[in-house]
Image (cartoon, rainbow, N blue to C red):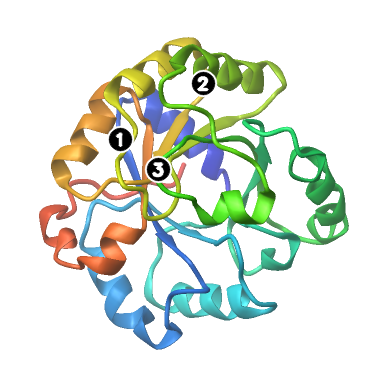
Amino acid sequence: MNNIYQNILKSVLEKKKLLAVLIDPDKFPVENAASFLQKVNTSQATHVFVGGSTVDDFVTEILVLEIKKYTQLPVVLFPGDVTQITNKADAILFLSLISGRNPEYLIGKHIKAVSKLQRSTLEVVPTGYLLIESGKVTAVERVTGEKPLSRSNIQEVADTAYAGQLLGMKLIYLEAGSGAQSALTRTMISEVKKTLNIPLIVGGGIRSKQQLDEAYKAGADLVVIGTAFEEHTTFFEELKREKHYESP
């Protein structure tokens, strides 16, 4: 499977909204993969993202191999560290934490990843990652030591996203964090989207179909849901498949 980014661009042009299910290897029991992916396959999900802030060595690859047994959806790495890179996935979001100023998460981790990526067949998608305050301290904050951007300063968030585009990022990812107490506002999503000519990903705090629809209406091209599916698998019933993910 390849050309995942081109497929995202195609979907944006055709005004098709995308949905990724995020699976955290540190929290997800591998033995649950078959039943969980069965629900994913009957939903509107178009991608499976795999990753977390803190994951033990080799756990990600084991999980990706198991996921691949039960779904044809593209599996995209959403790594918190170099140790989560595995060639068994289809693509990787090459995340740069542009909302922070820690050089390790702006470029340091990327340099350490290069030798692995050069030997892999993964499709690498440069992604500007913005952490937005969510009402609680997130795992990303604890691991990176970075503070999130304020929800009240939408202009700073929009400017940061646009700076990421100017730096050559192919995606911008607005993240409220795993288990966020509240989703990002429609106003914030809309204002950020207005500045961009590249796809916008939104994640964190979305726990209902209404919130999902609001994120789409505000301008999100791809929405990521993780915790809501882990805690309320009946959520899948609200998201019965409408269209399949089409390969180019």
Among the two numbered marks 1 and 2 on one chain, the one whose residue lies closer to the N terminus: 1
Spot occupied by residue 88 in the image (x, y as percentages of width and height): 62, 69
Q: Mark 3 or mark 1: which comes first in sequence?
A: 1
Nearest-to-viewer mark from 1 and 2:
2
Of the two numbered discs 3 and 2 in the rendering, the one whose residue sits closer to the viewer = 2
Q: Position of residue 236 (x, y in %)?
A: 18, 61
**Residue 187 locus on image (x, y percent):** 31, 18
Res. 56 image quadrant:
bottom right
Disc 1 to disc 2, C-alpha distance: 22 Å
Mark whose residue sits in front, 3 or 1: 3
Q: CA distance from mark 3 to mark 1?
A: 14 Å
Residue visible at 37% across and 55% down in the picture: 179
Q: In screen coordinates, is 191 left or right of 127? A: left
Q: Is residue 128 above or below residue 57?
A: above
Dot 1 corresponds to which residue?
A: 17
Q: Amino acid at mark 1?
A: Lys
Q: Secondary structure at mark 3?
A: strand
Which residue occupies the foreground of this view, 75 or 113? 113
Count neighbours of disc 1 (C-alpha within 10 A) and say few if under 14, some if 14 to 19, many if 20 or more: many
Q: Name the element at disc 2.
A: helix
Q: Which residue is mark 3?
A: 203
Q: Which residue is mark 2?
A: 157
- Observer-nearest residue: 14 or 132? 132
- Considering the numbered disc 1 on the image, is that residue within a helix, a strand or a loop? loop
Crowding around mark 2 (Cα neighbors within 10 Å: few <14, some 14 to 19, many 20+) is many
